[in-house]
Image: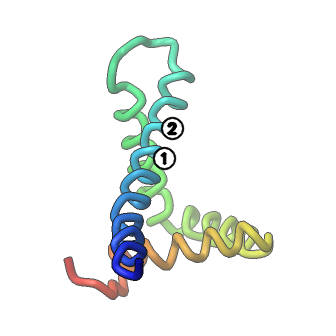
Amino acid sequence: MNWLAKTFLKGLLVVVPIAVTLYVVWAVVSTVDGWLPLHIPGAGLAITVLGILLVGFVASRALGSKVFDLLERGLRRVPVVKLLYSSLRDLLNAFVGDKRSFDT
């Protein structure tokens, strides 16, 4: 039984992040596609990528950085949001932040 439980948990560690990631990407692209009056396949994905690039561009500028810092301080004041936001931010910073903890 111990082997079965360990194997099941290892499977969860592989499946859950992949499933959650696919679901979030699908939900974002579907939502953006729903906002568009165009019926062009992939338009939601293209707009999502462009939106992320735009946010990254604005965040890298002085005024945008101050605005996002203010937003982050607000997010860190809400108890449940603080836990989720801080955890995701730390995870992403470990892989793609300025102070990477893991080498890929």
Q: Residues within 10 Å of mark 1 (few under 14, many from 20)?
A: few
Residue under label 1, please give it.
24
Compared across the picture, whether 55 is left or right of 97 comes to right
Instruction: Name the residue at 41% across, 61% down.
Output: 17
Specify the farthest residue to the right.
78
Please name the residue shown 37% across and 34% down the image: 45
Q: Secondary structure at mark 2?
A: helix
Q: Is residue 43 above or below residue 64?
A: above
In percent of width and height, residue 61 lies at 47, 65
- Residue at 38%, 78% in the rendered image: 6
Residue most extreme to the front: 1
In the image, residue 29 above or below residue 36: below
Quarter placement of the N terminus: bottom left
Q: How many marks?
A: 2
Q: Residue type at mark 1?
A: Val
What kind of residue is marked 2?
Answer: Ala
Q: Position of residue 22 (x, y in %)?
A: 40, 46
Quarter of the image holding residue 65?
Answer: bottom right
For label 2, the crowd category at 10 Å Cα-Cα, with few meaning under 14, some 14 to 19 and many 20 or more, is: few
* Quarter of the rendering occupied by the C terminus: bottom left
From the image, tell me which residue sits under label 2: 27
Give the quarter of the image for residue 63.
bottom right
Q: Secondary structure at mark 1?
A: helix
Q: CA distance from mark 1 to mark 2?
A: 5 Å
Q: Nearer the viewer, residue 7 or 76?
A: 7
Q: Are marks 1 and 2 in contact (CB under 8 Å)?
A: yes
Determine whether 37 is above or below 101 in the image: above
In percent of width and height, residue 96 lies at: 34, 73
Looking at this rendering, what residue extends furthest in the left direction? 104
**Which colour style is shown?**
rainbow
In the picture, the disc for residue 9 is: none
